[in-house]
Image (spheres, rainbow, N blue to C red):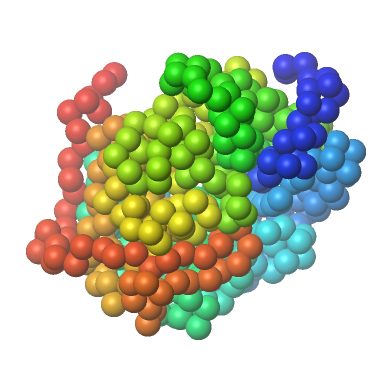
Amino acid sequence: MLGINTNEILETINMIRDEHLDIRTVTMGISLFDCVSENPEKLCENIYNKITNTAKNLIPVCETIEKEYGIPIINKRISLTPISLIGAGCNSDEFVKIAKTLDKAADTLGVNFIGGYSALVQKGFTNGARELINSIPQALTETSRICSSVNVATTKSGINMDAVAEMGQIIKQTAFLTKENDSIGCAKLVVFANVPDDNPFMAGAFHGMGEPETVINVGVSGPGVVASAIEKAGNCNLTQISDTIKKTAFKITRMGQLVAYEASKRLNVPFGIVDLSLAPTPAIGDSVADILEKIGLEKTGACGTTAALAMLNDAVKKGGTMASSHVGGLSGAFIPVSEDAGMISAVECGSLTIEKLEAMTAVCSVGLDMIAVPGDTTAEVISALIADEIAIGVINNKTTAVRVIPAYNKKVGDSVEFGGLLGEAPVMKINTASPDIFIKRGGRIPAPIHSLRN
């Protein structure tokens, strides 16, 4: 365990007060394998009891750490073993009952979100995975704190295009069923390639197969701190900018390491990882886009954006890795549109497009995140958008994902509003040239040749 002293925390007081520095999430991972039962009612009972007993002290401990150290912990969350495995013998209706049980447990504990309503289908569907996926629209409509994810590809297995095609339909159904709330259900559903087992961030968090019985994972934030450091660095070259980012990321991650260590010790739960990701918020001054503009771009989306983001992502990882004994999750810079005031501004002025965002995802964490598109966008176009982004992850052996909102009855120029960290998003133009034949071919896109390493 790296030694941490109070002086390191005192150094961050100004960052917390003026630059939006916070711990974005403390996430407790919980294994549900010992909850399995052939009786759906007993399964739900076991799940509820396991979650509420295991995580009963999560909120009190986090609140105590906040008060003692003056460090804001914005979200307290739970991630679970993929529910498609735990309910492998269930039908779609029974999976919805499990979702309601998870929601009830989250409400009882007071956690913000509970993740793991998930399926892993990169090479094909089990019966349980198929039933869970079919239940997602109803489950997300009838709950408020459930987050869902589906992994459709890995570099080792290629891309399950049958799953990609199905997820386009599922996203459209979810948008329709939650249309009264700007299709908010889609904001809690993410499609992955190369999904990590220890990600503390929603909507993609779940408790992976190789994880311990319980674990504490922490996600840090701090775009505002990095932007401020670059501004203070003044007129210097890009090597010096990169060094400034590294040093700042080190300080941010040390705070995350402290919180992770304290939460782990007080909860008597193993410490898992610190996720180094720069996670923005809708607040002015807490934006990854602002960092890129401080580096020297007139507006995010301009030529040079991808190069600047690549440097930022690399420097964050280099600085953060030295500050924590265990790093994992997604780790890098997030570029969600609705959750980043600078990204929203860049979209609204026409500088940032979906195509440019896709290029940026090749060099940053995750992918096309919290993007609103017109409600009449077809399921096939959504599936093709997913396929493009997933291909970037598979070919580059990195995690990528899509969280897209086809906002019902909305058109380009409108906006959707979710509030809180989910923020608001301008509805973006998407290429509607038909990919129908491509998507309907189905099958699997084979793994790339460089996956054959042993």
Please tell me in which quadrant of the rendered image residue 275 appears. Answer: top right
Q: Position of residue 299 (x, y in %)?
A: 40, 46
Residue 25 appears anywhere in the view: yes
Left or right: residue 185 versus residue 9 is left
In the depicted view, which residue is nearer to us: 141 or 231?
Answer: 231
Q: Which residue lies at the image location 56% right of the left edge and 61% below the top edge?
A: 422
Left or right: residue 27 versus residue 208 is right
In the depicted view, which residue is nearer to us: 98 or 439?
Answer: 439
Relative height, residue 434 to residue 56 (above, below) = below
Q: Position of residue 255 (x, y in %)?
A: 72, 30
Relative height, residue 108 to residue 345 (above, below) = below
Relative height, residue 180 to residue 51 (above, below) = below
Quarter of the picture holding the C terminus: top left
Q: Position of residue 93 (x, y in %)?
A: 48, 76
Quarter of the picture holding the N terminus: top right
Q: Which residue lies at the image location 37% right of the left edge and 82% below the top edge?
A: 409
